[in-house]
């Protein structure tokens, strides 16, 4: 997936269009045809109605961030501050143990900065 936890995203469609926030959770789909969903901090808020547990308590309405489709959000580059497409770059990393490891890094296609 191109969007991960703690990334900053901008909402493209919906009632919160144009707002940015930090990704709290990424929910992978169980069905391969379905799209992944993300939970963004402070965006796409829904109400949950809670019944009182005792006679003395009152019912409540709790607001919480609801998951939205991953295709409705775009990643914001930390360097240029714009929404950007994600590219990948492979880097050969050689440790002291002489094992070669290939590291795959995400990069911004506009400014070529590592995300």
Image: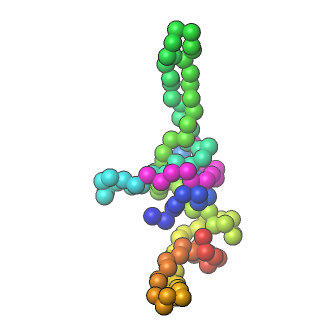
Q: How is the image coloured?
A: rainbow
Residue 99: percent from the left, percent from the top?
46, 88
Residue depicted at 66% across the width and 66% down the height: 78
Residue 32: percent from the left, percent from the top?
31, 58
- In terms of depth relative to the viewer, which is nearer, 45 or 102? 102
Residue depicted at 60% across the width and 47% down the height: 41
Q: How many labels sit on residues?
A: 0
Residue 111: percent from the left, percent from the top?
64, 76
Considering every residue shown, the one lying at the far bottom of the view is 98
Q: Does the segment drawn in magenta span residue 83?
A: no
| Range of magenta residues | 15-27
- Against 59, residue 25 (above or below) is below
- Against 98, residue 90 (above or below) is above
Considering every residue shown, the one lying at the far front of the view is 97
State left or right for residue 68 relative to residue 40. left
Q: Does the segment drawn in magenta span residue 25?
A: yes
Rendered-image quadrant of the N terminus: bottom left
- Against 66, residue 10 (above or below) is below
Rendered-image quadrant of the C terminus: bottom right
Q: Is residue 41 visible?
A: yes
């Amino acid at each position: 997936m191109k969007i991960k936890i703690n990334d900053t995203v901008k909402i493209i469609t919906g009632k919160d269009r144009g707002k940015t926030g930090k990704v709290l959770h990424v929910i992978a789909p169980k069905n391969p045809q379905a799209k992944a969903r993300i939970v963004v901090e402070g965006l796409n808020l829904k109400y949950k109605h809670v019944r009182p547990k005792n006679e003395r308590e009152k019912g409540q309405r709790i607001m919480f961030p609801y998951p939205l489709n991953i295709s409705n959000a775009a990643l914001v580059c930390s360097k240029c501050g714009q929404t950007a497409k994600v590219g990948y770059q492979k880097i050969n990393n050689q440790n002291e143990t002489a094992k070669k490891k290939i590291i795959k890094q995400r990069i911004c296609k506009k400014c070529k900065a590592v995300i």
